Image: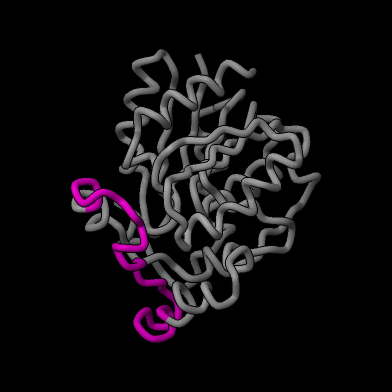
Amino acid sequence: MATFVLVHGGFGGGWEWRRVGDLLRSRGHVAFTPTLTGLGERAHLARPEIDLETHLADVVAVLSFENLDDVILLGQSSSGVVVTGVADRVPDRLRRVVYLDALVPASGQSAIDCFPASLAEDLMLAPARERGGGWLIPVIEEELLGLPPEVSSWYYPRLVPQPLRTFAQPLRITGDGGSSVPRSFVHCVRDREDAVSELIGPFAEVARASGWDYRRVEAAHDAQVSDPEAVARTLDDIALLG
């Protein structure tokens, strides 16, 4: 049995992990699916000053108040930045960090820094200026998710705009970056290239070159909603690594 804390990516919420969480629990694991401040059912708390440090504090608080140790901490997509920061802050509480098709930042990088400049401008900075009052990133266009229609029709309407500073604030490493915590990278791949695969591919290659545990899942980027069974199987297998 393992204890998982599953952190959603941009615009989402803990709600999107329901099926994966249920599948992990059916296998005897414990699964927590927190929602970051200003998103999901906590969207009413959105305000300009919410930043990356707020989201780090959200996850650290779950570990602390639930008194969790030996945790497998997963970050999906942009929350690769969040879990990297959490591993730096509380490495003693973690057994492993899993990046599910996620950004892997260096110290001093923000999520936006992990994007090519033109893509960051088109997807986040310009929309925030033009439609988000300068502080809120509107939800990206539905077709960019590349999800099957029956999945997208459930998933996309639940996404909400995200405070810009959660993407723009650089990650501040305060210790050794949690270098003692083992890492896994779960790479979501499919038979066509798109903006997301072009973005995530270099991080997957760095993970492989660095000797991380590396896995592939034949699924869209948001595999937790498009193929929760495959994600749960993969996490169940990762739990055996110790």
Quarter of the image where the C terminus is located? top right
Q: Which residues are magenta?
A: 127-152
Decide if residue 188 is on the left or right side of residue 230: right
**Image x and y of residue 213, in percent:** 65, 31
Tell me the quarter of the picture where residue 30 sits: top left
Decide if residue 158 is on the left or right side of residue 211: left
**Image x and y of residue 67, in percent:** 54, 27
Q: Measured along the vertical axis of the image, is residue 17 above or below residue 234?
A: below
Q: Measured along the vertical axis of the image, is residue 9 above or below residue 233?
A: below
Q: Residue at x 61, y 23 (%)?
A: 70
The extreme front residue here reads 191
Q: Is residue 47 visible?
A: yes
Q: Is residue 57 visible?
A: no
Decide if residue 197 is on the left or right side of residue 171: left
Q: Residue at x 48, y 21 (%)?
A: 236
**Image x and y of residue 235, in percent:** 49, 26
- Asked whether 41 falls inside the magenta stretch, the response is no
